[in-house]
Image (tube, grey):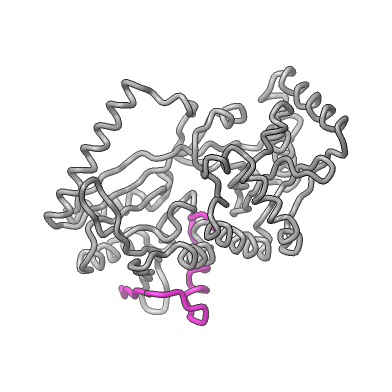
Amino acid sequence: MKVEEYSHFNIDSMLEPVWRNLLNLSDVDSIFGSYQWAREWWSAFKQKNDKLCLTLISEGNQAHGLAALYLTQEHWGALKANVLAPVGQNTAQYLDFILPVEPEKTVSRLFDFLIEKPGWDVLSLNNMPKSSVNFKYIKSAASARKLMVVEEPEDVCPFILLEDNYNTFMLKRFRSKFRKEIKRNTRRLQAKGHHHFEMIYKTKNLHRVFSEIVRLENHSWKGKKKLGIFSTPSKQRFYYQIMQVLAANGKLVVLLQWLDNKLITYEIAFLSKNRFLAFNTAFDSDFRIYAPGVLSQVELIKQCFKMNIPIFDFLRGGEHYKSKWTDVATQNVNLHIFAPTNRGSVLSGGLKGRMLLRKLKRRIRPRRDVADFKIINSS
């Protein structure tokens, strides 16, 4: 098997169609695993000394797999570590290697290549779905080469299986009190002005409303705590570019809730294979008493049934509001694989110590900002 490493995104190269074909053949998420997401992320967030390591594995004329990585420096406790990390981390909700052809053989060849590659201390595969078909192959290939592997639990990802129809779903899931509250809040908003929803799919409409979306997030609690996805100019540029790309490919849905000419909620979602990915939302806190976020969620569920999408994915985070809608979730993990060096051994020991300390703290002071979900291996 041949391994090629690309150190830059070249729009004229053959890498993009090869990447797209591998992604279409795989079970990897088609949004966060895409060439476009990786390219826009690298353009927006790369640091001065970061090095791109796009690794393509092929045999003969057939591409077998792709690992979109980059080499960066991170603080690990008191040490600085040279980390091979997934391109797109901190923005993408799901990250994985793309290994649709002979995955066990392909990932074994990838690790042979990585062992010979100098300059890295740890391979950190952050936010990998534990349900990934690649998960066991990656762990097995690393263990077979006597590499130290540490599995760190990450966010849960709640999702809704949309069965039957909208009315049946609401009747099964919610008591009449909740359903009446939705109708009551809708009437209260209608009494204050022209209350309506708007769906955005196309690039030209996105350009018209993007500044309003940014303004609303800045006005929300996320914006006030600097936690929003539009909190910096570089983030605004990245998400605007990626939303344009997705709109052009028919994979973007933006739901806006208006009262007269005032935007009171937005929901940004992506269409990925058979899933509706609820990526980001915010609401105007001045309208909190009307539960506008709930009204937007109801409208999104309606749209999913209209589009015959079977899975509504809340993505990362086990926030309590999600537990109103579902009680099941998948689990993300951070899979850390350490180089066979003294430095790698020290770093793995430090991580295990920090994980143990974190576990003890959770026993003493359990988290109350997240809900309990039933974790399943696949959806």
Q: Residue at x 11, y 54 (%)?
A: 342
* Number of numbered discs visible in the structure rendering: 0
Q: Residue at x 71, y 51 (%)?
A: 212
Residue 323 x/y as whole percent? 56, 28
- Please tell me whether residue 121 is drawn above or below residue 39 in the rendered image: above
Magenta residue check for 50 = no
The quarter of the picture where residue 183 lies is top right
Residue 137 x/y as whole percent? 32, 53
The magenta segment is 1-30
Q: Residue at x 48, y 41 (%)?
A: 378
**Drawn side of residue 72 relative to residue 121, left or right:** right
- Nearest the camera: 96 or 379? 96
Q: Quadrant of the N terminus?
A: bottom left
Q: Residue most toward the left?
A: 342
**Drawn side of residue 105 relative to residue 303, left or right:** left
Is residue 325 shown to the viewer in this render?
Answer: yes
The quarter of the picture where residue 77 lies is top left
Q: Residue most toward the bottom?
A: 12
- Nearest the camera: 132 or 249? 249
- Nearest the camera: 105 or 211? 211
**Drawn side of residue 294 relative to residue 367, left or right:** right
- Please tell me whether residue 157 is drawn above or below residue 211 in the rendered image: above
**Drawn side of residue 249 relative to residue 259, left or right:** left
Magenta residue check for 29 = yes
Residue 8 x/y as whole percent? 41, 75
Is residue 23 shown to the viewer in this render?
Answer: no
Residue 198 x/y as whole percent? 79, 48
The quarter of the picture where residue 356 lies is top left
